[in-house]
Amino acid sequence: QVQLVESGGGLVQAGGSLRLSCAASGRTFSSYAMGWFRQAPGKEREFVAAITLSAGMTHYADSVKGRFTISRENAKNTVYLQMNSLKPEDTGVYYCAGTPRYGLMSHGGFYDYWGQGTQVTVSS
């Protein structure tokens, strides 16, 4: 069982940066591949980024490639999402998710554990 708690969201102007954190409970964090998803008002949840359990590989949605960076510190049971050059269309609730499956997964159905989300608002 893994519990996930996101933090770091907020209001930022377009072009600005934010760093989201996701703290995981439990001693098996390093055994979980992790991902970030987001959901804008009135839209379906969408994939943002994923990272393998060893942080050896990452995968990004085309819409954030080159602007966002996912990373993890297994010693701190934490996964991060560094977001640069933010755009108003990046606005939404950001969720981290974890799965014991190997690999990089962009479909939310493959993730077993979810955080409560943190709001990111980018003003124009």
Image: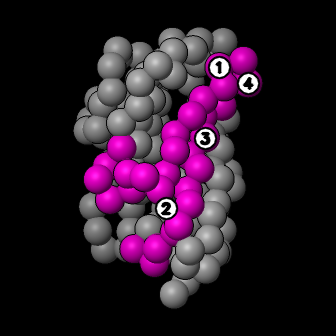
Q: Which residue is mark 3?
A: 80
At label 3, the amino acid type is: Tyr
Q: Which residue is mark 4?
A: 76
Question: Is 1 on the left-hand or right-hand side of 78?
Answer: left
Position of 58 with respect to 105 (left or right) is right
Does residue 105 appear in the picture of this structure? yes
Mark 2 and mark 4 lie on one chain; the one further toward the N terminus is 4
Tell me residue 90's x, y (percent).
44, 68
Mark toward the viewer: 3 or 2: 3
Amino acid under label 1? Asn
Q: Amino acid at mark 2?
A: Val
Q: CA distance from mark 1 to mark 3?
A: 11 Å
- Residue at disc 1, secondary structure: helix
Q: Is residue 59 above or below residue 16?
A: above
Is the residue marked by circle 3 packed among few (<14), some (14-19), or many (20+) residues within 10 Å?
many
Q: Which residue is mark 1?
A: 74
Q: Nearer the viewer, mark 1 or mark 2?
A: 1
Q: Residues within 10 Å of mark 2 (few under 14, many from 20)?
A: some
Do callouts 4 and 1 mark residues in contact (Cβ within 8 Å)?
yes
Q: Identify which residue is drawn at 55% across, 83% down.
A: 123
Q: Residue furthest right?
A: 76
Q: Residue shown at 51%/15% (left/top)?
A: 54
